[in-house]
Amino acid sequence: MTAAEPIQATVQVAPARTGTAPPADPAGRGTKRVFFLTVLAAASVVFLYPFVWLVVASLKPRDRTFTDPFLPWPVPFRPENYAAVWDAAPMLAWLVNTVIVGVAAALAVTLSSAFVAFGFAYFRFPGRNLIFGSVLATMMLPAAVTLVPTFLIWNAAGLTGTQVPLWAGNLFGSAFYIFLLRQFLLGVPRYVFEAARVDGASYLDLFRRIALPLSRPALIIAFIFELKASWFDLMKPLIYLQDPALYTLPRGLKAVVDQFYQGGDPKWEIVLAASVVTTLPLIVIFFLGQRYFVQGIATTGRRG
Amino acid sequence: MRRLRPETRWAYVFLLPWLIGLVIFQAGPMVASLVLSFTEYDLIGSPEFAGTANYARMAEDPKVARAIGNTVFYTLLHVPLAIALALALALVLNRITGRAAGAFRTIFYLPSMTPYVAVGVLFLFLLNGQAGMVNQFLGLFGIEGPQWTTDPDWVLPGIVVMSLWNLGSTTIILFAALRNVPRELSEAAMIDGAGTWQRFRAVTLPMISSALFFVVIINTITSLQMFDQVYTMFFGNQTAQQSYGDAALFYVVYLFQQAFQFLNMGYASALAWGLFLVIAAITLVQVKVGNRLVYYEAEERA
């Protein structure tokens, strides 16, 4: 439980104030400002250029993959690589699997965490602090520790080899999101709930009609964070999926690397195009939900 | 038995999913893996009691020593470098005004939106010893870059280089903390004649110490559990003899291999508990030390 103290402290000291205008900085003008902008621009090149290289290299023929790495457009241009990658691997099926598993995982965790968070935020009951302590404690529990028994559970349930273990564990809420949503709901004035109670609303109504709609921004944060986490996940698909038709994109990309980079059949352009296909949808999601990402990282401190 | 008030009963209804999950997926597995760590279990037979054999094996297994060494080496390089760089970026971000800061923040976060498997693939190419972009760039300055992906001495530094591409969330957390440092404090210090460094040291640093402390803990814990990128780059179905041997063997990679490739579930559970104790100990020590170093605004108000 002590391990969670810094998280609370961070939230207190660093609430998301990302929407407000930054303080006017008199030192940020003139030559100093030019210097700072130059530093940031240089850093931006370092962070962005690997993407440029990836996309450019994926559009070149194989024998040119490594040539002219600083030329930011493909010569010669070879978009056929993207046709070839669909033939070489079932990318479309993997993309669909990733979306299905990701949405199931994100929906499950968002709704169950909101349900539990409402319980913590609204009710006063014996044992509340103790149980909330268990929420905070599991945040620090490394996933690797429960890897083997969790596998044995899904194995006993006869669900290994299916996609169910990739998302069904999320039905019971997750510490980070419960914490986030509880913080959010504690900010709702209590009389809002009490007024509804007087009007005869049940506790389930309070959750469905008041808590859920009011915590929309926090629900969106939880949803897109979990969608991203699911889209990143390599270990669970490695453990639970054998049939390539059920693979998600990261697992599929790993199979592509094993066959076409490490194996005896080097087809680098396929590997690169498959990497772009794996990454691009997330970048799009990021731009759509950018505001929520920044807010979510700043408030929960969750590593994105 | 005392009857619960209806409100209390409803409270437990709402907590029920968490309590069930806690038993099935958290506390239960913790206990189960502790029990399994004292057995031999290959999934086919039933677990056989083996006493402390797994722990004795851990102590003697040269691969465990290698994996711990690699993981600790990586963590000791990654955490200070990542936080120093992220703090530098956040400080510069905090000095410019308006939309530009938001745009740069977005750019710095983009690498964190790249799935780790794709990051691993990308850096297999970028760090390629013969023709990768990194070595071609070094070549522009007449430096002959090392064989990052094949020379056992350079595999870990290469992984650190890759990890430093991913500073987005650490930068965002530190930037958010910097934004909350009241300007009056810094201005007051300036009027008192404090220089840039003094103001940073005496005002900014204490004010962001809790955020700084938090990113140290989180980065340490995630570094110790490094898996995806490294597994993508150096493990899997490679048939060729690898020149780098165990240079990229991280602790969780070894745990994964023992559990799911060799089906040594008992031994893997012992490895998992070893990791758990280490992470718990590190977190405790960091919290203890942190309580002395960190300035909590809340205490002042209370």
Image (tube, rainbow, N blue to C red):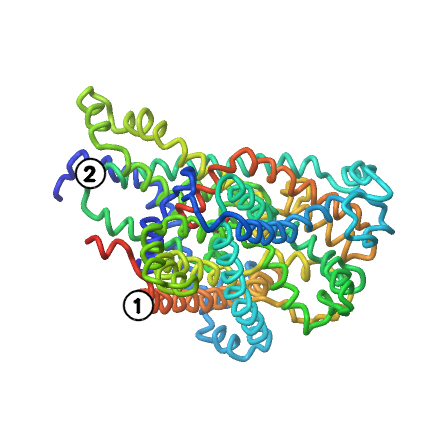
Label 2: how many Cα within 10 Å (few below 14, some 14–19, many 20+): some
Q: Earlier in the sequence, mark 1 or mark 2?
A: 2
The answer to whether one can see residue B22 in this image is no
Q: Chain of mark 2?
A: B
Q: Nearer the viewer, residue A101 or A73?
A: A73
| Residue at point 57%, 50% (across, down) | A34
Task: Name the spot of residue A261 as percent of width and height, x first.
Answer: 77, 55
Q: Is residue A301 left or right of residue A160?
A: left
Amino acid carrying mark 2 in the image: Thr
Res A98 → quadrant: top right
Q: Which mark is residue B53?
A: none
Task: Name the spot of residue A299 as percent of width and height, x first.
Answer: 39, 45
**Residues behind callouts 1 and 2 on a single chain:** yes
Task: Name the spot of residue B100 as percent of width and height, x first.
Answer: 54, 42
The answer to whether one can see residue B250 in this image is yes
Location of the N terminus of chain A (image quadrant): bottom left
Q: Which mark is residue B8?
A: 2
Would you name the residue on which mark 1 appears? B292
| Residue at point 46%, 38% (across, down) | A292
The residue positioned farthest toward the top in the image shown: A199
Q: Nearer the viewer, mark 1 or mark 2?
A: 1
